[in-house]
Amino acid sequence: MNFYLDHPNKEAQQKRLDAIPQSANDAVIDTWIGAVGEHLAQRWHLKVPSWTRRDLHFALREPVFLPSAPALRGIVIVESPPALGRDLRL
């Protein structure tokens, strides 16, 4: 939330993104964190932090849908940030 409160101060937003998060020790959460960091940087025309490319942010081996209901998968795929789909290495 603080990231958005810094708008329109790009320097402050970049500083927030550059802070390296600790691992959550959960592949789904770590992948989500990496994708959100990349998405926010791209969305607000900032530099994508190098930490978003750490191996722990690419630990998933199959897609995870949240919510998991099969009927909602199409919506989740279409509405998810592109960075989240990129984080799955098969």
Image (cartoon, rainbow, N blue to C red):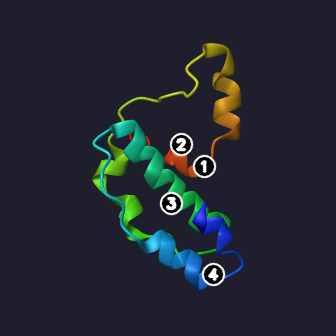
Residue at image location 47% in from the left, 45% down from the top: 32
Dot in front, 1 or 4: 4
Nearest the viewer among 13 and 65 is 13
Residue at image location 72% in from the left, 79% down from the top: 8
* Mark 3 nearby-residue class (10 Å; few <14, some 14–19, many ≥20): many
Mark linked to residue 10:
4
The residue indicated by pointer 1 is 82
Residue type at the position of mark 2: Gly
- Above or below residue 80? Residue 65 is above
| Residue 46 x %, y % | 59, 75
**From mark 2 to mark 4, how far is it between C-alphas?**
26 Å
**From mark 1 to mark 4, how far is it between C-alphas?**
22 Å
Nearest the viewer among 3 and 14 is 3
Nearest the viewer among 31 and 78 is 31
Determine whether label 1 and label 4 are within 8 Å by CB.
no
* Quadrant in the rendering for residue 51: bottom left
* Mark 4 nearby-residue class (10 Å; few <14, some 14–19, many ≥20): some
Q: Regarding mark 2 in the picture, which secondary structure is present there?
A: helix
Determine whether label 2 and label 1 are within 8 Å by CB.
yes
Mark linked to residue 37:
3
Residue at image location 49% in from the left, 78% down from the top: 15
The residue indicated by pointer 2 is 85
**From mark 3 to mark 4, how far is it between C-alphas?**
14 Å
The residue furthest top is 70
